[in-house]
Amino acid sequence: MKKTVIELKDVWKTYNMGKVKVNALQGVSIKINKGEFLAIIGKSGSGKSTIMNLIGCLDIPSKGNIFLDSRDIAKLNESKLAQIRGKKIGFIFQQFNLINTLNALENVTLPGEFQNMENNKVSESAKQLLEFVDMKDRLHHKPSQLSGGQMQRVAIARALINDPEIILADEPTGALDSKTGEQVLNLLKELNRKKGKSLVIVTHDHSIAKHADRIIELSDGKVLKEYYNGRKHENN
């Protein structure tokens, strides 16, 4: 039986927009297994950004439970959530979110420094990761000196510096041309298959989602469909 690393149970997220309440998520239940490649897909307004924030411990639900390694993160304060984010989850964003004043090596080491890793250890790990993503010749280049694909490779290395169990990628190829996007996607698949990382990609692009082991499609804050190895399940 596969280990469940994250489980959402009847999760609701409600935002108060003045006098109007908006239900961004409505009773969503999802399990994410260790080593799984999951794609969460949906149009704008479907709730996929909200679910990404909840899975990534960037927010807590209005109702329901979210279990990370059997611990209910819905009951934790921001300080505890930040600790879990730093150790358990690596983030990859569409716009890279690199710090412009730092070079590639410094960008990758930064999350490790936040987790109080020893300077020598974090620097060596960062160099190894940059070599893994084929950026060993760009250690001292700043983001302005890198292409979009190179910046995303640095961002992937940064996401791995604390050896997280889960990689959470938000439209990771959205700012790249198709060829570079395919290279980045292949790199993410390698992380999943060879290093055993649980990979969750949040996207609107079906051509990206089709590479996943499982696809969950959201609509109006609810799970509309699930695909397991090509088999579709409708949620009524």
Image (cartoon, grey):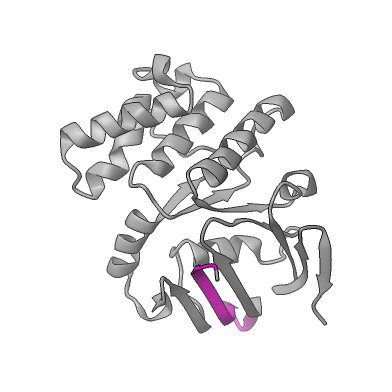
Residue 93 visible? The answer is no
Could you tell me residue 92's position as x and y percent? 51, 44
Name the quadrant containing residue 18: bottom right
Task: Give the residue drawn at x 64%, y 29%.
Answer: 183
Q: Which residues are magenta?
A: 2-22
Q: Decide: is 99 above or below 140.
A: below
Name the quadrant containing residue 122: top left
Q: Residue furthest top?
A: 137
Closer to the camera, 146 or 185? 185
Closer to the camera, 214 or 107? 214
Q: Residue furthest front?
A: 1
Could you tell me residue 140's position as x and y percent? 34, 18
Residue 50 visible? The answer is yes
The magenta stretch spans residue 18: yes
Task: Give the residue drawn at x 55%, y 46%.
Answer: 192
Name the chief secondary structure element in magenta.
strand
Task: Give the residue drawn at x 38%, y 58%.
Answer: 88
The magenta stretch spans residue 79: no
Could you tell me residue 230's position as x and y percent? 82, 58
Task: Give the residue drawn at x 65%, y 62%.
Answer: 48
- The quarter in which the N terminus is drawn is bottom right
Could you tell me residue 165's position as x and y percent? 43, 55
Q: Decide: is 219 above or below 207.
A: below
Judge left or right: residue 184 versus residue 6: right
